[in-house]
């Protein structure tokens, strides 16, 4: 079982969201990947207006049209627009097929603007995925650091969350959320550097590590290499590649009547 936590249609070729999704599915089939999670539309914006994130989510819904048996969608929102984001969560998750939210770089995730969003996701059993990255030259004002996620997770210790990209600078990212048992790490989106999966396995355990690729911006193969090439037990690799994400998503999938 391989479930890819982190994919985008924006970086895949094609004229329409449906064509881009077909391209991703073809490549996933070559690598034995069973399910994909899709975030954001064909043209991203760092600080989207409600009209913008609704349009991007509409594109993801279009991409899922023929692929509900292979893919899940996460709603892209902007916490600066609290009510509009809550409305979008209801539209896409409560009343639609999506199973989680994607937070990017509009606002740091330690902001209390996220509190009602986290609480609504918890009610719906929706996945909370937060992009994080420690940028050497300095983060943008709204870009979250792993320590920001640790702060948010401490406020909501019973709500599962995912630290996107393991914080970019993964040695610091893993340490930042080590004590937050409700936070898992996403391996996607940076070079397959030796040691990342081994350190995560040693520091937080296999059950809190989730495979993702960041395709099509990254290749499935290079990101799978972070798991396949890791010096950890084979049983841990199998857990990271799919069952961990499936376990996290199972409550909302069961609530929606989705077989997985």
Image: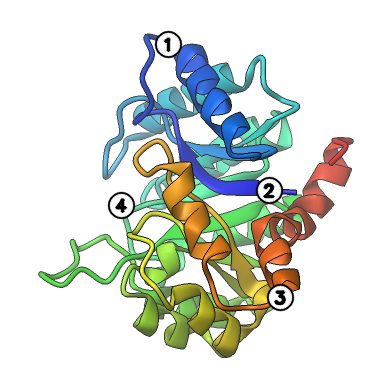
Check disc 4 and report the residue beneath it.
106
* Numbered disc 4: secondary structure: loop
Check disc 1 and report the residue beneath it.
16
The nearer-to-camera label among 4 and 1 is 1
Residue appearing at x 15%, y 72% in the figure: 136
Dividing the picture into quarters, in which one does residue 254 lie? top right
Q: CA distance from mark 4 to mark 3?
A: 25 Å
Tell me residue 185's x, y (percent). 53, 69
Which label's residue is closer to the chain start, 2 or 4? 2
Looking at the rendered structure, the number of numbered marks drawn on it comes to: 4
Asked if residue 38 is positioned above or below residue 166 in the image, the reply reads above
Residue appearing at x 49%, y 83% in the figure: 199
At label 1, counting other C-alpha atoms closer than 10 Å, the crowd grade (few under 14, some 14-19, many 20 or more) is some
The nearer-to-camera label among 2 and 1 is 2
Which label's residue is closer to the chain start, 2 or 3? 2
The nearer-to-camera label among 2 and 4 is 2
Dividing the picture into quarters, in which one does residue 90 lie? top right
Q: CA distance from mark 4 to mark 1?
A: 26 Å
In the rendered image, the quadrant that contains the C terminus is top right
Residue appearing at x 56%, y 89% in the figure: 203
Asked if residue 49 is positioned above or below residue 86 in the image, the reply reads above
Q: CA distance from mark 2 to mark 3?
A: 26 Å
Check disc 2 and report the residue beneath it.
2
In the figure, is residue 254 to the left or right of 167? right
* Numbered disc 3: secondary structure: loop
Q: Is residue 3 visible?
A: yes
The colour scheme used to paint the residues is: rainbow
**Which labelled disc corresponds to residue 158?**
3
């Amino acid at each position: 079982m391989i479930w890819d936590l982190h994919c985008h249609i924006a970086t895949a070729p094609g004229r329409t969201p449906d064509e881009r999704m077909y391209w991703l599915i073809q490549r996933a089939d070559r690598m034995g990947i069973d399910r994909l999670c899709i975030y954001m539309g064909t043209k991203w914006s760092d600080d989207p207006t409600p009209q913008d994130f609704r349009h991007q989510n509409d594109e993801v819904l279009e991409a899922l049209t023929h692929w509900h048996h292979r893919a899940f969608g996460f709603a892209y929102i902007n916490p600066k627009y609290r009510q509009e984001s809550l409305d979008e969560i209801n539209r896409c998750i409560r009343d639609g097929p999506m199973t989680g939210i994607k937070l990017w770089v509009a606002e740091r995730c330690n902001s209390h603007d996220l509190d009602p969003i986290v609480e609504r996701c918890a009610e719906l059993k929706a996945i909370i995925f937060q992009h994080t990255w420690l940028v050497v030259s300095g983060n943008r004002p709204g870009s979250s650091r792993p320590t920001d996620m640790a702060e948010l997770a401490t406020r909501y210790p019973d709500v599962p969350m995912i630290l996107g990209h393991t914080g970019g600078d993964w040695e610091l990212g893993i340490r930042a959320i080590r004590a937050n048992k409700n936070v898992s790490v996403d391996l996607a989106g940076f070079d397959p550097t030796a040691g990342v999966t081994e350190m995560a396995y040693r520091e937080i355990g296999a059950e809190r590590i989730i495979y993702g690729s960041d395709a099509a911006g990254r290749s499935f193969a290079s990101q799978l290499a972070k798991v396949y090439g890791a010096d950890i037990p084979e049983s841990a690799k199998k857990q990271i590649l799919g069952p961990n994400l499936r376990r996290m998503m199972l409550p909302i999938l069961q609530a929606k009547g989705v077989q997985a």
